[in-house]
Amino acid sequence: MSTHHNKISLLTINYNSTEYLEKLIKSSKKLQKYINEIIVIDNNSNLNNRNMLKRIEKNTPINTKLIRNKINLGFFKAVNQGIGVTKNNLILLINPDCLITNADSINEMINFIHKNKNNVVVGGSYIKTTKEKFNILQLKE
């Protein structure tokens, strides 16, 4: 397998969730072995959130694409918009209020996809909500 096939684009849709998004992106740093691109579709967040997005975009070590919509397109249109600009075959669609705590789960998902070529979608499961209101996910088989 070429490493390109094992690289993941992290895709998230933001609407006034930038405080969560910043922590999601920080949690993704430990996954740079897998994630080489972060795509954030902003669905016309308020000015404060847009300013925070600029700071996040500049301070993220992983290649980050920030697309700012002038109107709120809704979740599914924004997801399709993000998929349209990804460069990888694997996409991790994750809400901004989630944290990635276990790199092994990402590796398990990649292996599962390669072993089960007919599968199109692999999902994680909710483990718990932290005191900061983040959702912790892991691979669900």
Image (cartoon, rainbow, N blue to C red):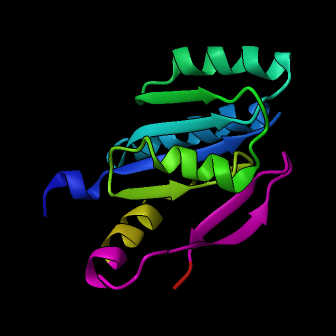
- Between 77 and 25, the residue placed more toward the observer is 77
Looking at the image, which residue is at 68% across and 60% down? 136
Left or right of residue 84: residue 94: right
* Residue 94 picture quarter: bottom right
Tally the marks.
0
Q: Which residues are magenta?
A: 112-139
Check residue 123 for magenta coloring.
yes
In the image, residue 30 above or below residue 5: above
- Between 55 and 134, the residue placed more toward the observer is 55
Rendering coords of residue 97 (x, y %): 75, 48
In the image, residue 50 above or below residue 141: above
Looking at the image, which residue is at 74% across and 36% down? 43
Looking at the image, which residue is at 56% across and 27% down? 66
Rendering coords of residue 20 (x, y %): 75, 38
Rendering coords of residue 125 (x, y %): 65, 74
Left or right of residue 92: residue 99: right
Check residue 39 for magenta coloring.
no
Q: Residue furthest left?
A: 1
Left or right of residue 32: residue 56: right
Q: Quadrant of the N terminus?
A: bottom left
Rendering coords of residue 126 (x, y %): 71, 70
In the image, residue 49 above or below residue 5: above
In the image, residue 90 above or below residue 110: above
